[in-house]
Image: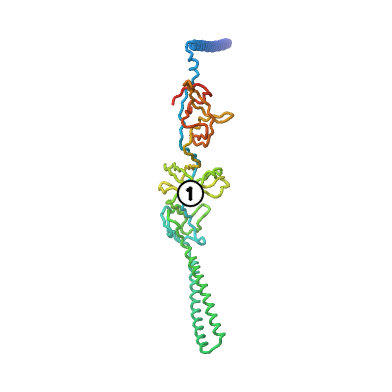
Amino acid sequence: MKKITQISITALAMFIMASCGNSKKEGTALINDKKAAIEKLKAQNTKNEEEIKKLQAELEKLDSNAAENSNIKLVATASVTTQDFKHYIDLQGHVDAQNISYISPRGMPGQVKALYVQQGQYVKKGQLLLKLDDAIMQQQVTAARKQTDVLKTQLAFAKNVYQRQKNLWDQNIGTELQLISAKNNVESLENQLQGANEQTKIAVEQLKTANVYSDVNGVADVVAIRVGETFQGMTASGPQIKIVNTSNLKVVTNVPENYLTRISIGSTIEISIPDVNKKFTSTVSLISQSIDATMRGFIAEAKIPSDPALKPNQSAVVRIQDYAANNAIVIPVNTIQNDENAKYVFILSKLSNGKSVAKKQPVVIGEVYGNSVEIKAGLKNGDQLITDGYQDVYDGQLISSQN
C-alpha cells in the first residue's frame, strides 16, 4: 500500500512539471507573435511614408507652386488700434466705519449700578448708557457745599463787622488798625469762599462722571458689562461698550511700500465687496504718514456710501489706479517674445508681389496689466499683429492670415 502511494505522488509531480513547461512555451509563442505584428506594421508605415514622399516629389515637378505653398503658415491677425490704457494695484482691504466709539468712563473705573443700553440697540449722542457707583462723590459734593455755606456765613459776618468799624472810623472813633484788620478779614474770607466754590464745582463735575454717555449716534455693537461689574472701558478681551455708526463708511487697505510714489490722495480706486455683490468707484481720501514695520506698507483709505448690507471688517477687493495713458497702443501680452537683443512681435507684411510674410518687429513695452501690455514704440495704428500662430513662424516666412 505504501509503495502504491509513493508511485501516485511521483506521477502527480511529473504531470505538474509537464503542464508548466507547456504554459511557458505558449507564453513565448504569444510574445513572438506580437513582435512579428509590430514589425509588420512598421514596415507598412515606412512604405507609406516613402510613397508619400514619392508623390510629393512628382507633384512638385508638375506644380512649381506646390513646394512654396507647402511652407505657407496659417496665422490669425488683428489690426493694431489705440485705446485708453490703465494700470491698477490689486489689493485686499476691509470695510470700516468712520465713527466707532469705544465707551470709557470720564473718571476712574467704577462699579455699575444701573445699565440703560442693550446690545444691538440704537443710541443717540449724549444718551445715558450706564451709571456708576457715586456714593463717595455725593458725600464729597455735600461736604463741599457745607463748607461753602459756612464760609458764606462767616463772610457775611465779617462784612457786617467791617461796615460797623468803617462807620465808627468815619466818626473818628476807633483805630485805623481795627479798620484794616476788619477789611483784611473780609478779603480773606472772600478768597476762601471763591476757592470753596471751585472745589464744589470740581466735586459736582466728578459726580457727573458716574454717568456714562454715548459719544456718537449709532448701534451698540458690543455691550459686555453687567450691573455689579467694574466698568473701565477697555479690557484685555476688548471694549466693554462699542458704538458703531455705519452712516459714514470707508474701505481701508495696506499698500506695499514700493508703491509709495505711485499713488496719492485723489487717486481713483475701484472697490468690490464680493459677499454682497457691491461695487463702488471712489478716490483715495487718506494716506498714512508712516510705514508699518511689520507689514512693510502704508494705510490708504477711501470713502464709500452707506449701505445696510455693509458691515465693519467686511472683506473688500481693492484696485487703485496708479497709471493711465490715453490713445495708447495696447496688445495682448502673450504675443510678446524675447531674444538676446530685445522684445519683439510678429506682424504681417505685404511684399511687392502681393504675398504676405511674417515680419519680426522689435518693440518697447510700457506697463503691463492683466492680459494687456502698453507699447511705447515699435508699432503703429493699423499694423496687422499676428495673434495666433506666432510661435511657429520666423522672420520672412510666407504666411496666410485670417482676421
Q: In which quarter of the image is residue 296?
A: top right
Asked if one can make out residue 19 in the rendered structure from this viewpoint, the answer is: no
395 horizontally vs 127: left or right: right
In which quadrant of the rendered image does the C terminus lie? top left
In which quadrant of the rendered image does the N terminus lie? top right
366 versus 403 height, above or below: below
Q: Residue furthest front?
A: 352
Asked if one can make out residue 336 in the rendered structure from this viewpoint, the answer is: yes
Residue 245 on image: x %, y %: 44, 52
Residue 78 on image: x %, y %: 45, 29
76 horizontally vs 11: left or right: left
Nearest the camera: 378 or 143? 378
95 versus 391 height, above or below: below
354 versus 295 height, above or below: above
Name the residue rendered at 49%, 67% in the picture: 137
Circle 1 sits on which residue? 285
Residue 311 on image: x %, y %: 44, 47
Q: Residue furthest bottom?
A: 172
Nearest the camera: 388 or 248? 388
Nearest the camera: 172 or 352? 352
Nearest the camera: 311 or 400? 400
Amino acid at dot 1: Ser
Residue 104 on image: x %, y %: 49, 58
In terms of secondary structure, where does tag 1 sit?
A: strand
241 versus 54 height, above or below: below
Name the residue rendered at 56%, 86% in the picture: 176
Q: How many numbered discs sit on the rendered protein? A: 1
Name the residue rendered at 45%, 36% in the picture: 83
